[in-house]
Image (cartoon, coloured by chain):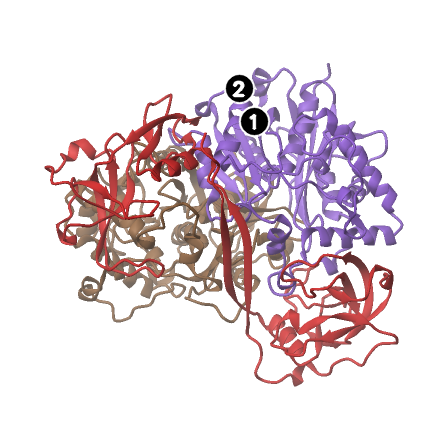
Chain colours: A purple, B brown, C red
Amino acid sequence: MTREEPSDRRDVAVVAFAQSDVLRTTDELSEVEMLMPVLHSVLDRTGLKTADIDFTCSGSSDYLAGRAFSFTLALDGVGAWPPISESHVEMDGAWALYEAWTKLLSGDADTALVYSYGKSSPGSLRDVLTRQLDPYYVAPLWPDSVALAALQAQALIDAGDTDEPALAAIGARSRRTATLNSHAQLRGSVPPGDYAVRPLRTGDCPPVGDGAAAVILAAGERARELCSRPAWIRGIDHRIEAHSLGVRDLTDSPSTRLAAERAGAFDRPVDTAELHAPFTSQEVVLRKALRLDDSVRVNLSGGALAANPMMAAGLIRVGEAAARVHRGESDRALAHATSGPCLQQNLVAVLEGEPR
Amino acid sequence: MSKEPVAVVGIGQTKHVAARRDVSIAGLVREAARRALDDAELTWADVDAVVIGKAPDFFEGVMMPELYLADALGAVGKPMLRVHTAGSVGGSTALVAANLVAARVHGTVLTLAFEKQSESNAMWGLSLPIPFQQPLLAGAGGFFAPHVRAYMRRSGAPDTVGSLVAYKDRRNALKNPYAHLHEHDITLEKVQASPMLWDPIRYSETCPSSDGACAMVLTDRAGAARAPRPPAWVLGGAMRSEPTLFAGKDAVSPQAGKDCAADVYRQAGVTDPRRDIDAVEMYVPFSWYEPMWLENLGFADEGEGWKLTEAGVTELDGDLPVNMSGGVLSTNPIGASGMIRFAEAALQVRGQAGEHQVERAGKVLGHAYGGGSQFFSMWLVGARPPMS
Amino acid sequence: MPEVLKAPLVVEFPFTRSLGPVQSAFLTGLRERVVLGVRAADGRTLVPPVEYDPVTAEEIRDLVPVASTGTVTTWAWNHAPRRGQPLATPFAWVLVRLDGADTALLHALDVPGPDAVRTGMRVRIRWAAERVGAITDIACFEAHAGGAAPDGGDPDALPDDRVTGIVAPARLDYTYSPGRAQSAYIAALSTRRTVGERCPTCRKVYVPPRGACPTCGVPTTEQVEVGPRGTVTTFCIVNIKAKNLDIEVPYVYAHIALDGAGLALHGRIGGIPYDQVRMGLRVEPVWTEGARYPDHYRPTGEPDADYDVYKELL
């Protein structure tokens, strides 16, 4: 049985966030060359050095790079000497953050560095992602990620949950708000474009790009020393659904709803939400699952529709939400990350700033 | 607030073989998970979260296969994490799972690691051709053999020590029904007469390529109290990493390995590992790594590890049995190999290792490593709960 | 800064996938033009049949036949088919709930255009002419006017020569670029010079440079030429012929610390009998025309290096 949250649970906060500009290609940079400035930047924000960090956890995928053990070279950018306590998930960095959060909760660490990165430019991302699918019944058909999202979008349209103009409006709003985000790849006035896979147009799809992000977590007093307004993680949870698209209701995201419940997202309203919705239609699903109304500011960063570096885009949602708390622009923010086809796996974190 | 003590109450693994042609990838992991649950007398509904690990996704050609495996592991509606820390991943995966219990995030966690190497070819997966780079000139063993030579030079060990380890581990494997290699006619002479592949490493001193999975059920004090069989208690656990290649790296006795062991010993209150620890299940993919790790882990002084092997101390009936299961030399589903070490340590302190049970197994160390001898994960388990 | 290097990287393998009993029955059925589902604990019939109940996690084995006709539950129009997809001409991706099934199967629907497809439309399987026991035995779906076709018959009546595995070829094409530091290293090699980079913090010289000093975690930028001579710090004798290498065995594979380098790189030793190679041997590179890397290293004839000089460079 999952336990009730112990009342004496350690307080853990996001105390710093940094990200690279997200670019269509970064072929002049190796992964570590792309990642290292981000690591330096996030450490600089706290004044910490690698040796001051108790635990390091990263997220990345060999399949993006087209080579096994690609994360071992990225470790060069950390400066893991003397040896460090370190782990890696083959998942989005949001799940690396989750692992690090548990290390702080258990008292094994007081500070943690979390990073993730993805270079989608070397390969054809739509084809690469087909390798995530059931290897017996689905992967041999090579249905690409846009096609699967389009099946989900049509199901939403059929259910009366949205229509093509509403989807276009989500894309337009995301790129418009992204004009304030200098790291975003797709900003300003972006036309809806032609159909990519109908009913999704190019404007409903995320840009393909390369990028990296990093976050520092700290517990209790250490967090207060490192950040004037820490973004306290009031709850964080993640859930996975069945894999087969045909057994799921694609218009709903029960795993997001359950994770949000467990993270305490419904206990009190949030003022800000960062949703990892790579496709416009997925924002519709997530808003419904998370019961977000118009009073909540959604994806002021522009979200994944403005910049979607694989394996980092989820961690960036947590980082963006935390940064708004740091800057005093939010008191209670929700961050969401997703993985797998059509929102199969979802993570929800609730971040709060102390009263000002 | 102190950590919640963590207990291993269920262990399951598949019979490791070169190719499991009768199951899907899901069927393979399922078999180990089901056995671990049966051992703990629990159902899928009793599991709060699943933590899974494996080595590179290219081995099976499935990207992030945990997405497809969620149904088979009863993870639907639950949290599922996927760890990848190269060869140490089986150990790291268990430690990530253990920490979920220690942090009181979950009460009962299923952890599992696997590799189904027969879906492709391990050497293909490990050496995808990278443009502009010099092709790997020597194969997997060639990567490790120069380090073995460096160890021999440094320690002055006689060149027969490697064969003693292989002979011992293969005999231990005969007592372990789950081991891949069961060489009933093994003799020391045969090991020593086997072809020299990557001099100083002989064929019989290398590990096989296996299909296999290993699973454990980890739980808290309350869960341990309900367990039908004696639990193994986690007395200490740690991971350490250092860079792949760097100026001044000691590939024979990496600092990360020493630091990792020291952290585990500190947590468990071990001051003299040779005296306080009863047996070790360590990651030995090539036989010479036994004496090398004996030194790295503090069971022998530098340059002295081979003397323990030569004197029979590491035999199943020796004073410090090493690789009671037959070790990686007898079974190697890469992503699972680390967890099999951790599970064997737990089996021993639970007194459930069957024919390869050592008599006095109060505290047993499980050890895994990977990458360019750079990622280490270890745990020390005991028959008694940690003092708190 | 030298030009950024790029080259194609093809990751390709024919994966050999063994099947569990449910998958084996389903794919054998497709070969025989029979579609099988599996009954879940809640009474639903799942098509395609999965091995484990998505709700209860229990193993499910109760196979039932369903029809080859069904209803589109959602669709998406793919005007530009990609490599490996079921049809080379524009088609609709569809989820189809076959008659008798409670869940939907993903496949392609061959219709003239997006106006010819809608959710709720009736479709039937178009079987591939040659069937081998794979999901591609369903060539695609096509429009179907009418009710349910009779189901395919008794799952127990499948022939004994069951499909027990599939071969799943997978090819992904990447464009590899090694980044700034390695590009500079490779550019220098083309003039037969080995150029490493020095860490501004610890002053060690990295060869090949990887863009970061791995112990200090800072960029290396100062270029330093090392070698050409060096010392064999350790080695092994390779007696097993590698599949993709045209080198006669036995040969010596060595760690070689080039003079001035902070760590060893790897190379083959030639110009000396393999059994006379030793730790400490002094060597120099031997180039062949047009090669990116030295073909091998040969003895220089200098006295062997003292162990204490290179023992940190193994």
Q: Which residue is mark 2?
A: A44
The kind of secondary structure element at disc 1 is: strand
Looking at the image, which residue is at 42% across and 37% down?
C182
Q: Residue at x 20, y 50 (%)?
A: C270
Q: Quadrant of residue A24?
A: top right
Q: Few, some or many C-alpha atoms within 10 Å of disc 1 (few <14, some 14-19, many ≥20)?
A: many
In the rendered image, residue A25, in percent from the top left (x then y), is placed at 59, 38
**Figure disc tally:** 2
The quarter in which the N terminus of chain B is drawn is: top right
Instruction: Write down the residue under mark 1.
Output: A216
Q: Is residue A291 left or right of residue B116?
A: right
**Identity of the amino acid at label 1?**
Ile
Where does residue B60 sit, x and y in percent of width and height? 51, 58
Up-down: is B276 above or below B290?
above
The subunit letter for the residue under badge 1 reads A
Identify residue type, mark 2: Asp
Residue B220 appearing in the image: yes
Tell me which residue sits at (11%, 40%) in the image: C301
The answer to whether the residues at label 2 and label 1 have Cβ atoms under 8 Å apart is no
Query: Disc 2 on helix, strand or loop?
Result: helix
* Residue A245 occupies quadrant: bottom right
- Tell me residue A253's x, y (percent): 76, 47
Single out the mark in the foreground, 2 or 1. Answer: 2
Please report the residue visible at 66 percent of the width from the left and 62 percent of the height from the top. Answer: C85
Q: Which residue sits furthest front?
A: C289
